[in-house]
Amino acid sequence: ICQNFFPWLVGPMHGEDFVDIEVPEHWRRVLFFLPEFVRVPQTATAERCRFLESAQCASVCVNICKAPSQAWLSGDFGMPVHIEPNYDDLSCRWRFGVTPPPLLEDDAVKAPCFKKCPSKTPNTPSLRERLRAEGPRPLSVVGELGR
């Protein structure tokens, strides 16, 4: 699904970690052209995420794409997914069936701001940089993420 519906947002994607899924027999009896098994990717990778590339901001990636997409797919579709942006090459992996770690423990949140981040205030560390420097904190910090 990602390979067909998300390229307009994140760019071309390809599947990885394929598994064979059996097509139910009652479907095959009605739809005779269906195969016995279909290969389904468990991971989709955007080679260069258009969203991340245009935003040039790790916080925008996490707060506008990663966290909401993980919550939406898990909550509305019951499909856990761990989205792993790579801030070095701007690629992004979507690992389906993998429960993401708590947001404040996720490596994507712990990454420092981009040097060219358009929303970074000069000489002022961002919340993500303060969290990274301070180490583990109680969940009360979640309220600060919106500030």
Image (cartoon, grey):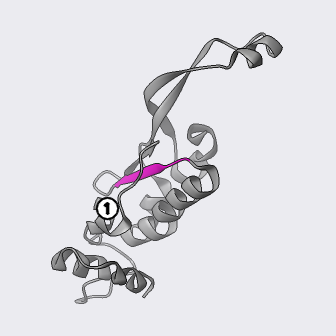
Q: Name the quadrant containing residue 9.
A: bottom right
Q: Nearer the viewer, residue 26 or 12?
A: 26
User: Is the magenta region chiefly helix, strand or loop?
Assistant: strand
In the picture, residue 113 is in which quadrant? bottom left
- Label 1: which secondary element: loop
Where is residue 71 shown, x and y percent of the image?
53, 61
- Left or right: 102, with 107 as reference point: right
Q: Specify whether 90 is left or right of 29.
A: left
Examine the rendered structure and indicate whether residue 79 appears above or below residue 128.
above
Q: Which residue is mark 1?
A: 106
Q: Residue at x 75, y 11 (%)?
A: 33
Residue at coordinates 41% horizontally, 43% vertically from top-left?
A: 47
Residue 91 placement (x, y as % from top left): 38, 49
Number of marks present in the image shown = 1
**Residue 145 to residue 82: above or below:** below
Look at the image and tell me in which quarter the C terminus lies: bottom left
Identify the magenta region: 79-85
The residue that appears at 29% across and 69% down in the rendered structure is 114
Judged left or right of residue 52, residue 110 is left
The amino acid at mark 1 is Asp
45 is within the stretch colored magenta = no
Q: Is residue 119 above or below residue 103?
A: below
In the image, residue 47 above or below residue 37: below
